[in-house]
């Protein structure tokens, strides 16, 4: 399983990058961003709950003293991250918001150094730089910066911080011995509870059950776009350190960009292609480092 860990994290990033397909459909049906987040968290929580009832009910058990781990992954990470990210989109350009979000690997690296004594290595720093530069090129923030405001920068950095917190709190839960399935279920239980208070529940239910197509999109968003990637990411996190995992997961914007070109006929610049190459190069550096560790 250790050899497959980087691949599992990469699969998570790819599936997260596919979410735009489902989000665009639900947005076209009249749902706002935070309502989509609430729907995503709810479907994920229900799907994981049903799975655990069938697979092993003992995995529902957690200690009250460890509740903070799941409040961290669910509320402080998912809810806070989405709120800040959507706020950044309203006060800054999408490209600026996306680039600030992908400060997350750097935040993870710094926090993991102090909290888990994960060492800075040349490979990590190089991969981090390539990833960040690649994300800047992919989003086109240099050629089309749009609006850049203090509020936008603050919200974007908040999104990156919230995004990074999943790796931190998830690591604590893993070290306390909790199963990947348990972590995923309680993450989305608290995320669902945290987002429903900000949304119009009646509208969400109406859209989700409006027709068979909408229902399938909701299930796809919850299962393929959420449950599966969070399971694979959390499982990979057991064998890959936080900073490296965060860098590998940055394949997400590359996936989203490629899908935008293929499915929605969006244009991509030469710098965008170069950005994709740099992110892929960073993934190879991370993976080669894993192989060196195994060999030693």
Image: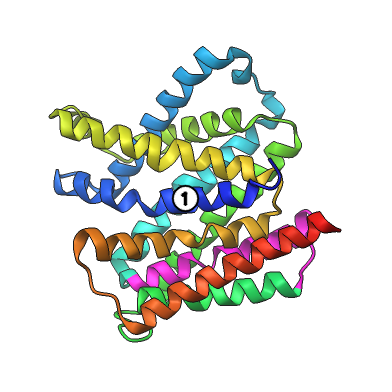
Question: For the magenta stretch, what is the residue range?
Answer: 95-121
From the viewer's side, name the closer residue of 89 and 267.
267
Task: Residue 247: name its quadrant.
Answer: bottom right
Most extreme residue toward the right is: 296
Nearest the viewer among 243 and 161 is 243
**Closer to the camera, 167 or 4?**
4
Specify the farthest residue to the front: 295
State the residue at coordinates (25%, 62%): 262
Q: Classify residue 194 by image quadrant.
A: top left
Residue at the image point whose x is 53% and y is 57% from the top: 249
Density class for disc 1 (Cα within 10 Å; few <14, some 14-19, many ≥20) is many
Asked whether residue 197 is in view, the answer is: no
Q: Which residue is mark 1?
A: 80
Q: Is residue 126 above or below residue 193?
A: below
Q: Is residue 109 magenta?
A: yes
Drawn side of residue 179 relative to residue 248, left or right? right
- Magenta-drawn stretch, dominant element (helix, strand or loop): helix
Q: Is residue 247 visible?
A: yes
Q: Secondary structure at mark 1?
A: helix
Q: How is the image coloured?
A: rainbow
Spot occupied by residue 204 in the image (x, y as percentages of width and height): 23, 34
Coordinates of residue 243 in the picture (x, y in percent): 66, 60
Task: Report the side of 103 relative to 261 (left or right).
Answer: right
- Looking at the rendered image, the quarter that the C terminus falls into is bottom right
* Residue at the image point whose x is 71% and y is 54% from the top: 241
Which of the image's four quarters has the N terminus?
A: top right
């Amino acid at each position: 399983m250790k050899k497959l860990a980087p691949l599992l994290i990469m699969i998570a990033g790819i599936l997260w990058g596919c979410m735009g397909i489902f989000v665009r459909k639900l947005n076209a049906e009249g749902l706002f961003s935070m309502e989509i987040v609430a729907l995503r968290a709810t479907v994920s929580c229900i799907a994981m709950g049903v799975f655990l009832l069938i697979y092993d009910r003992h995995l529902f058990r957690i200690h009250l003293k460890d509740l903070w781990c799941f409040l961290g992954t669910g509320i402080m990470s998912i809810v806070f991250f989405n709120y800040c990210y959507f706020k950044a989109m309203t006060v800054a350009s999408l490209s600026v918001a996306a680039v600030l979000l992908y400060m997350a690997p750097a935040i993870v690296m710094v926090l993991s150094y102090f909290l888990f004594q994960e060492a800075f290595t040349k490979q990590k720093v190089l991969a981090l730089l390539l990833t960040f530069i690649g994300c800047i090129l992919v989003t086109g923030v240099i050629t089309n910066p749009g609006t850049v405001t203090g509020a936008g920068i603050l919200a974007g950095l908040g999104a990156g911080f919230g995004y990074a917190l999943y790796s931190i709190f998830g690591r604590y839960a893993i070290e306390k011995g909790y199963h990947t399935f348990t972590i995923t279920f309680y993450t989305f239980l608290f995320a669902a509870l945290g987002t429903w208070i900000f949304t119009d529940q009646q509208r969400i239910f109406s859209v989700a059950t409006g027709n068979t197509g909408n229902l399938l999109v909701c299930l796809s968003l919850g299962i393929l776009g959420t449950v599966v990637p969070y399971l694979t990411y959390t499982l990979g996190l057991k064998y890959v350190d936080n900073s490296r995992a965060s860098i590998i997961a940055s394949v997400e914007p590359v996936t989203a960009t490629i899908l935008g070109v293929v499915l929605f006929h969006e244009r991509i610049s030469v710098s965008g292609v170069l950005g994709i190459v740099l992110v892929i190069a960073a993934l190879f550096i991370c993976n080669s480092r894993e192989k060196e560790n195994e060999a030693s």
